[in-house]
């Protein structure tokens, strides 16, 4: 077992943040932890890494209690950039980890090269941009070649090129047998690296395999909307009309069938758009109240 | 306006003003407490002030009294006699008012006295003393007091609101107050750059000049708040706790050698406050200019502080710079504000305003140096050519801490400032030494002439007078020899002694220049032995505060110095000591005695000795504590870097030990470096010093009473001398143990506390309280590690002699301090080992699904 979390409870004063969280990671994979701000994602990650004591519950990492600091030889935790020493260089940070972990210089340089931070490694962190700091943190998390990587918002502050690089790195690490537990708000990026998501809602965990929820929806614009609607109804194909476009789920009807139905009624397709719906759709459903409130605020 | 509101809100939320409040209240309380304790001296001092006048009045009255009895007074003499009579009468009531503490009556009687004095002189009388400016001042002050219906107040140790406020303002509205503001609020601008919170404002539609101005206005606001706190606290504390009167209009003299004027106390406080605000406005404007070019708060504060200090020292040194246009003159307010005013206070205020406008304009137009002037972005070479260590985790943490110190550079900057302070202090010391030496040698050079021209002729006159008295007695049929003969022997002895003293002084002067010190010691020993003999005789009948011990030790010390041919150290021949019996009302005399016999020398070893003797060692101790003593507390807060360390395969206890190990090594190493530098500066600019210079060491009664005690026994106690070199080695050894102990305490406190400032404050508080409580431990006092924080008094045996505990020694201190450090560290280590084995027991919450 790579990670086992059993019955975790945590409160801050009267506010209960975690209410009996239980989950297990048995095989190398990437799993995302998703939830709105203040839902307890960082608290959960901090408890898993023993930075924060739980009120109740048990965490086992690679068969050892999380209170054993030696687990950090086999796992790593990428935190936010406030943990970096502004007056040290990136090299100093990596060298310290190598000192403590007993790693050779070769591994340090290899990691720096892999993450792409070699060019600014000898500058003080206070001169780094946000993205550079994220890269350094990532290098610090990777340098000991961990079996389990816990990443708190790894994509924060990254430009698209860097985000793509990080995504590719995460996928490569998974291929190499590393389990990655990451928290992020970027649902589109999550969809690109994993289909396993842990939703944290009001202190409870909802574990979902997104491959089951992944849906393709066609948004179709036609020249004769009324005839098109009649034809779909006649063919018993469920649809929705939103902003003048017909929305049809692939699960309900394959695209060629829809085209055929329209052909019978002489309806011409003017434009068609294909959309894949995964975690975001699921997120919307799970956190319906929060997203609704958010939309209201936006209006 | 909204920016200023935002700035003020930040200042309010940061709660640093609470520190200001605490510091001001503490100072106000301490000053008041100190002054309140000295109130018994007020009557004595008031009486001393009129002593000469009383004697003179009595003498003049006594001269005219016989003529009055015989009714032979002329009209003018009659007026003089009546005036003197009235003056004596006024003095009698004046003294009565002093005895009965009826201070309101004093000015009335003084006025009577002054009026009659005028009448006396108007009638042709001559009152030799109390002339010129002195009398003019007394008359002006008396008239002022009566006009404003004010009583006589204790001006030396004031406890009335405005006089106390004046005293407090002189401290807190001076350089000390500016330093406090600089340390607490000096990072207001640069810390925003460091933490990048400046971006919040920069991404708003706000002009840079508006931002700088609002920042500056916020700092001015805090200055005004501080002044308000000082004024309120300084006024409220004595108003609440003192037996006081409304003294807001009490006269304050502004005087030079030939002129004076009087202003009310409130006006003096107002002047102090105005100049302080001016100085603070200049300082913050200057800081803002520096801050625009640098990113590091620490460097900005240090650089601003250093440049300001240099400006003040230059202004102090060069009289031509002491003019209103010089902004550093504002920092000397508490010096020149008591002098007769040359310029209006408003000229200083206008000058300050102009300087501030100029500096703020510079800050606005100067391009922001985000990268800093000091190449902050340059590449740093990796440590050990980038090769990782293979060390135990404790050592790895220790090494990492050292690298952090090096990269941060604070240690280097602090050491540089300390080095500059040492050199500045040394220059001051060297001046003092030169002054004392030339004063002592000048007096020695004058001695033979003075003896030849005054003492010997005067004794010879006395002998002649006595011989005449003998002859006259013989002529009257009395036995003149038996009546006055013994006096001749006494005077002849005095004559011989004077001649010997003159001869010894002549030799001493001649050989001193050739660095042959023995004759100088012979001269001193000759005098000391005579004084000791006189004291021995004198002590039989009257109270003499100075002890036999002091004279005895002084003689032995000189014999030692003569034996080892050690260069004399000035000044004074007596050794003030714990056996002196100064009465509480003799505090001033005691202080004078200590100052007169305070030895100073600027050789390397003696400079270092003074660092310990005068408790200057506390400064590096505090500095090192602040630099490396915060422990875990230094890695929490805004940048919780501790969380990074906690995600390493290292136990918390190893982190703790690694940090403590590093802090201990740095504290020890830097302290030793500082001490060596002190000795080096002395050696380079003067000489290495005398390893064998004798330092007095007290012994307990137990030791003195034992048969195998080989030291010296004086009437009051026993003592020995230890070589200066040995003293210094012991002091440094004890210092190292003390610093280890304090670092251990601070690091343990740092485990529980989030704020480094609280760690330092608690460490100081615990140390102070521990030291005071140690004295209550009676039989177990030697086991208290806190007792050994007073290094000089442990090394010279003062505490062991006072408590009569022979067990108290440097070595015992080392054992206790190291033992206590170990216990504290082991307890923390064990605590960290057991902590978090079990999660908090709490009734589980059942979630509603």
Image (cartoon, grey):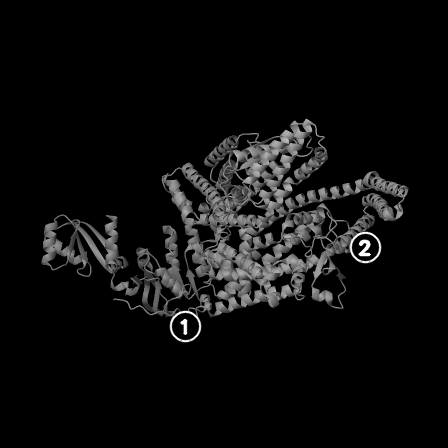
Residue beneath the point at 82% across and 41% down? B455
Secondary structure at numbered mark 1: loop
Q: Which residue is tagged 2?
A: B563
The chain identifier of the residue carrying mark 1 reads: A
Q: Nearer the viewer, residue B390 or B448?
A: B448
Q: Position of residue B237 (x, y in %)?
A: 49, 47
Residue A102 visible in rendering: no
Between disc 1 and disc 2, the foreground one is: 2
* Quarter of the image that includes the N terminus of chain B: top left
Real-space Cα separation, disc 1 to disc 2, in angstroms: 78 Å
Q: Position of residue B465 (x, y in %)?
A: 85, 40
Q: Nearer the viewer, residue B451 or B509?
A: B451
Please tell me the numbered disc located at residue B33: none
Residue beneath the point at 62% across and 40% down? B92
Is residue A164 depicted above or below B337 in this figure?
Answer: below
Q: Which residue is tagged 1?
A: A63
Secondary structure at numbered mark 2: helix
Please indicate whether residue B209 sits to the left or right of residue A256 in the image: right
Please indicate whether residue B347 sits to the left or right of residue B556 in the image: left
Residue beneath the point at 52% across and 60% down? B747
Q: Position of residue B451 (x, y in %)?
A: 82, 41
The chain identifier of the residue carrying mark 2 reads: B
């Amino acid at each position: 077992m790579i990670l086992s979390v059993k019955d975790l409870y945590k409160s801050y004063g009267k506010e209960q943040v975690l209410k009996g969280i239980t989950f297990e990671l048995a095989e190398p994979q990437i799993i995302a932890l998703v939830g709105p701000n203040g839902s307890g994602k960082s608290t959960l990650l901090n408890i898993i890494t023993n930075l924060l004591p739980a009120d109740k519950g048990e965490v086992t990492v690679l068969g050892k209690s999380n209170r054993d600091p030696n687990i950090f030889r086999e796992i790593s935790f990428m935190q936010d950039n406030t943990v970096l020493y502004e007056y040290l260089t990136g090299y100093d940070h990596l060298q310290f980890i190598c000192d403590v972990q007993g790693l050779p210089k070769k591994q340090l340089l290899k990691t720096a090269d892999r993450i792409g931070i070699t060019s600014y490694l000898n500058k003080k962190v206070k001169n780094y941009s946000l993205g550079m700091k994220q890269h350094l943190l990532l290098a610090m998390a990777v340098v000991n070649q961990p079996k389990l990587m816990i990443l708190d918002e790894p994509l924060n502050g990254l430009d698209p090129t860097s985000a793509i690089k990080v995504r590719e790195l995460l996928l490569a690490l998974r291929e190499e047998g590393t389990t990655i537990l990451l928290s992020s708000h970027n649902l589109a990026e999550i969809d690109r690296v994993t289909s396993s998501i842990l939703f944290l809602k009001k202190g409870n965990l909802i574990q979902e395999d997104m491959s089951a929820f992944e849906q393709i929806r066609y948004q179709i614009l036609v020249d004769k909307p009324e005839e098109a609607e009649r034809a779909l109804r006649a063919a018993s194909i469920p649809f929705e009309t939103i902003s003048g476009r017909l929305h049809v789920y692939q699960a309900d009807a394959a695209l060629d069938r829809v085209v055929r139905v329209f052909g019978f009624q002489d309806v011409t397709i003017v434009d068609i758009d294909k959309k894949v719906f995964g975690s975001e759709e699921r997120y919307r459903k799970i956190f319906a109240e929060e997203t609704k409130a958010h939309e209201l605020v936006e209006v | 306006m909204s920016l200023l509101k935002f700035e003020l809100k930040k200042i309010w939320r940061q709660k640093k003003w609470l520190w200001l409040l605490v510091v001001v209240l503490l100072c106000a309380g301490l000053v008041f407490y100190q002054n309140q304790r000295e109130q018994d001296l007020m009557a004595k001092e008031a009486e001393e002030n009129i002593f000469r006048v009383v004697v003179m009045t009595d003498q003049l009255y006594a001269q005219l009294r016989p003529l009055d009895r015989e009714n032979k007074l002329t009209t003018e003499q009659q007026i003089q006699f009546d005036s003197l009579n009235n003056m004596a009468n006024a003095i009698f009531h004046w003294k009565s008012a002093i005895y009965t503490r009826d201070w309101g009556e004093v000015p009335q009687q003084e006025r009577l006295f002054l009026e009659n004095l005028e009448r006396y002189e108007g009638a042709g009388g001559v009152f030799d003393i109390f002339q010129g400016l002195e009398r003019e001042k007394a008359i002006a002050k008396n008239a002022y007091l009566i006009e404003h219906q004010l009583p006589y107040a204790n001006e030396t140790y004031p406890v009335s609101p405005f006089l106390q406020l004046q005293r407090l303002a002189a401290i807190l509205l001076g350089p000390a107050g500016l330093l406090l503001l600089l340390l607490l609020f000096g990072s207001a601008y640069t810390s925003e750059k460091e933490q990048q919170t400046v971006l919040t404002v920069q991404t708003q539609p706000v002009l840079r000049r508006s931002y700088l101005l609002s920042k500056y206005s916020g700092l001015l606001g805090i200055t005004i708040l501080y002044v308000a706190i000082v004024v309120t606290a300084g006024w409220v504390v004595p108003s609440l706790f003192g037996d006081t009167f409304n003294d807001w209009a009490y006269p304050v003299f502004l005087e030079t050698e030939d002129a004076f004027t009087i202003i009310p106390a409130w006006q003096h406080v107002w002047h102090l406050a105005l100049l302080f605000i001016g100085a603070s406005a200049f300082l913050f404007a200057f800081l803002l200019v520096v801050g625009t070019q640098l990113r590091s708060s620490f460097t900005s504060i240090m650089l601003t502080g250093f440049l300001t200090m240099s400006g003040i020292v230059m202004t102090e040194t060069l009289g031509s710079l002491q003019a209103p246009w010089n902004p550093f003159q504002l920092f000397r307010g508490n010096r020149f504000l008591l002098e007769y005013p040359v310029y209006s206070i408003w000229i200083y205020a206008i000058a300050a305003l102009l300087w501030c406008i100029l500096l703020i304009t510079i800050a606005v137009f100067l391009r922001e140096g985000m990268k800093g002037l000091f190449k902050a972005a340059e590449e740093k070479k990796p440590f050990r050519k980038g090769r990782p260590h293979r060390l135990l985790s404790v050592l790895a943490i220790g090494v990492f801490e050292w690298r952090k110190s090096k990269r941060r550079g604070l240690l280097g900057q602090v050491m540089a400032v300390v080095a500059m302070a040492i050199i500045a202090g040394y220059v001051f010391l060297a001046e003092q030494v030169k002054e004392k030496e030339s004063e002592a040698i000048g007096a020695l050079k004058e001695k033979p002439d003075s003896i030849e021209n005054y003492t010997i002729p005067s004794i010879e006159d006395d002998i002649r007078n006595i011989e005449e008295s003998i002859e006259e007695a013989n002529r009257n049929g009395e036995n003149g020899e038996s009546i006055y003969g013994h006096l001749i022997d006494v005077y002849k002895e005095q004559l011989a002694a004077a001649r010997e003293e003159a001869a010894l002084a002549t030799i001493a002067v001649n050989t001193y220049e050739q660095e042959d010190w023995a004759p100088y010691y012979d001269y001193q020993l000759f005098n000391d032995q005579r004084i000791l003999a006189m004291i021995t005789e004198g002590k039989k009948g009257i109270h003499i505060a100075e002890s036999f011990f002091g004279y005895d030790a002084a003689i032995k010390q000189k014999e030692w110095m003569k034996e080892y041919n050690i260069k004399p150290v000035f000044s004074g021949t007596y050794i003030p000591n714990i056996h002196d019996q100064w009465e509480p009302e003799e505090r001033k005399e005691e202080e004078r005695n200590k100052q007169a016999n305070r030895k100073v020398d600027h050789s390397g070893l003696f400079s270092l000795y003074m660092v310990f003797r005068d408790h200057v060692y506390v400064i590096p101790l505090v500095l090192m504590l602040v630099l490396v003593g915060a422990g875990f507390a230094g890695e929490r807060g805004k940048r919780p870097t501790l969380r990074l360390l906690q995600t390493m395969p290292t136990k918390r206890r190893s982190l703790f030990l690694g940090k403590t190990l590093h802090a201990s090594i740095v504290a020890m190493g830097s302290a030793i470096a500082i001490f060596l530098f002190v000795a080096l500066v002395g050696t380079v600019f003067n000489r290495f010093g005398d390893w064998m210079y004798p330092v007095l060491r007290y012994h307990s009664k137990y030791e003195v009473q034992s048969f195998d005690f080989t030291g010296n026994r004086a009437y009051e106690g026993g003592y020995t001398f230890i070589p200066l070199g040995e003293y210094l080695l012991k002091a440094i050894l004890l210092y190292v143990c003390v610093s280890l102990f304090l670092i251990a305490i601070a690091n343990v406190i740092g485990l529980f506390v989030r704020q480094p400032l609280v760690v330092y404050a608690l460490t100081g508080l615990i140390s102070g309280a521990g030291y005071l409580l140690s004295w209550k431990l009676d039989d177990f006092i030697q086991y208290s590690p806190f007792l050994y924080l007073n290094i000089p008094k442990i090394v010279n045996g003062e505490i062991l002699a006072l408590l009569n505990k022979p067990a108290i020694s440097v070595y015992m201190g080392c054992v206790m301090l190291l033992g206590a450090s170990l216990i504290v560290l082991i307890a923390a280590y064990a605590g960290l080992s057991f902590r978090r084995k079990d999660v908090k027991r709490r009734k589980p919450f059942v979630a509603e699904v």
